[in-house]
Image (spheres, grey):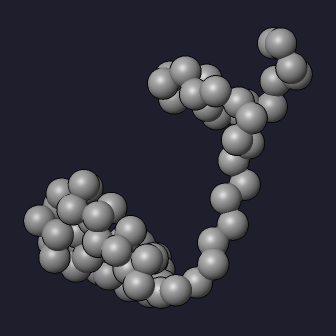
Amino acid sequence: MYEDEILNEVWKNRDAYTSKHHHDLSEMVKELKNRQERSGCALVDRRDRTRQSTGNLYDEIDFGRPEGG
């Protein structure tokens, strides 16, 4: 069977990162947000601020449907 060295390295790094954060997604997100804030880079927010959030994730995702669909 063929083994892809690049994928193996990516998976190894992913496993190391998740292990470092006890496989806790909220802990990983918190650390990434802190890292983002410390970076000092200006980030662009491309979300449309004119739309009101309904709280439903599927309402927030643009599935390529025409308006009103």
Which percent across, then down, holds residue 50?
Answer: 74, 35
Q: Quadrant of residue 7?
A: bottom left
Q: Residue at x 26, y 55 (%)?
A: 25
> Which residue is most to the top?
69
**Can residue 20 be seen by looking at this rendering?**
yes
Q: Residue at x 86, y 20 (%)?
A: 67
Q: Is residue 61 left or right of residue 9?
A: right
Which percent across, then down, holds residue 16?
Answer: 22, 79
Q: Residue at x 38, y 68 (%)?
A: 33
* Quadrant holding the C terminus: top right
**Which is nearer the eye, 56 or 14?**
56
Which percent across, then down, holds residue 32?
Answer: 36, 71
Up/down of 48 relative to 42, above or below? above
> Which residue is most to the left?
22
**Which is nearer the eye, 5 or 48?**
48
Up/down of 30 relative to 1, above or below? above
